[in-house]
Image (tube, rainbow, N blue to C red):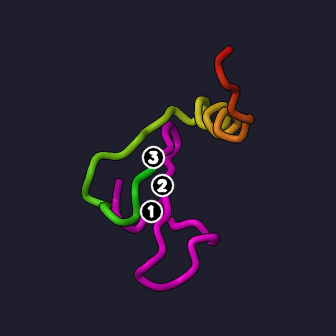
Amino acid sequence: MARENWRRSSYSGSGDGNNCVEVAHGPARISLRDSKTPTTPTLTFPTTAFAPFLAALKEPRRTGS
């Protein structure tokens, strides 16, 4: 994806010490990358899988029995 398509979270603030995730989206996929290392591989999802991914991240963690 082109560099201009990447957006940083508004929660990341300003300055060099902030670590955050950047997101880029197209018609068929959404990609995530680490803002500290933008040239490393990205995590890419089909657009239909991104919402369930976010929902799973928000679920409380369950510990094993």
Q: Residue at x 44, y 62 (%)?
A: 5
Give the distance between the C-alpha atoms of the residues marked 3 and 2, in whole angstroms. 5 Å
Residue 13: percent from left, percent from top: 58, 79
The answer to whether the residue labelled 3 contacts the one labelled 2, judged by CB atoms less than 8 Å apart, is yes
Q: Residue at x 68, y 32 (%)?
A: 61
The residue segment tinted magenta is 1-30
Residue 58: percent from left, percent from top: 71, 41
- For disc 3, the marked residue is 31
- For disc 1, the marked residue is 6
Q: Which mark is residue 34?
A: none
- Which quadrant: the C terminus? top right
- For disc 2, the marked residue is 24
Give the distance between the C-alpha atoms of the residues marked 1 and 2, in whole angstroms. 5 Å
Closer to the chain start, of discs 1 and 2, is 1
Q: Is residue 8 magenta?
A: yes
Q: Describe residue 36's horizontal placement relative to residue 30 as left or right.
A: left
